[in-house]
Amino acid sequence: MCEKKVCIYCLKDSSNTRNLEHVIPEALGCKDTLPKGTICDSCNSYFPNMDKNVLYNRYISLHVGTAEIPGKKDKIRKQLGEKLFFPKKGEFQIVLPGTIPAGELQPGMEIDFKIEQSKEFKELLFARGIHKIAFNCYAYKFGQSNALQNRFDNLRRYIRYAKTNELWTYGVRDSHSTANRSCSTLYETDLGPYVGLRLLSLDFFVSLTGWRHELEAEIIKNGYDIISRRGQWGSSSLLGLQK
Ligand SMILES: [Zn+2]
């Protein structure tokens, strides 16, 4: 006889679940999955669009391409969305602005360029995607019964059923590291549980029970930008890639 299980996102019966959810999307190089029944099949089939949108972030997609992170069936992908192609193995094509004549290019010369954000990228969905991955990491580490605590009810509602314009604040910085391409660290603080999430070249700082402004000064001191409204990913010179 099966033990009754409840999905950590929709709180419905997940005892007869068939599919497995990756803790961090497989496309980011993670093979670990949550135990069967942690997430129901309905939520599991709702999340792929959210995960794909995380990949559309310009810094993450650039890294997925240049680091040749294998996708499903360990195949190196050649394309992300409609706009970003990885033409050859070990090569990433960047079209420079037409302001520098080719003859003036010198080795070691610094050039400003902008990586366009894919039009398919949705910032509000991205924020939910980051929270979903962070909550998956929590459930992976502390188990399903802990993830079912009432204090996470707002979080699961936000991730699974957010209203159109809702954006939960989070922190992001350049990780300046190629070690541990995807990993998470969990902090229990007086102001609630937080997850430090590394996704390839980016570090995220995510609250699991709602953002507390008291923490911001400390987070900024540690090099994070605070994403608190729509439009920041599209326009900012985040993370030193473009100044
Ligand atoms: Zn569910």
Image: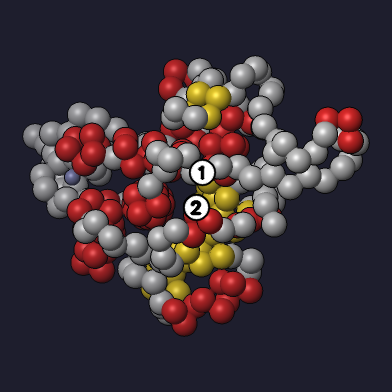
- Contact flag, marks 1 and 2 (Cβ < 8 Å): yes
Give the Cα distance between marks 1 and 2.
6 Å
Residue 159 in the image: x percent, y percent? 28, 54
> What is the quadrant of residue 212 in the picture?
bottom left
Q: Which residue is rendered at x = 76% and y = 40% of the image?
A: 99
- Residue that label 1 marks: 117
Sequence-first tag of 1 and 2 = 1
Q: Quadrant of the C terminus?
A: bottom right
Q: Amino acid at mark 1?
A: Gln
**Image quarter in which the N terminus is found:** top left
Q: Residue 234, which numbered label?
A: 2
Regarding residue 229, the answer to whether it shows in the image is yes
Residue 156 seen anywhere in this rendered image of the structure: no
Q: Residue furthest bottom?
A: 214
Please state if 12 lies on the left or on the right of 34 as rendered: left
Q: In percent of the image, x 65 and y 17: which residue is there? A: 88
* Picture coordinates of residue 69, whole percent (x, y): 56, 29
Q: Residues within 10 Å of mark 2 (few under 14, many from 20)?
A: some
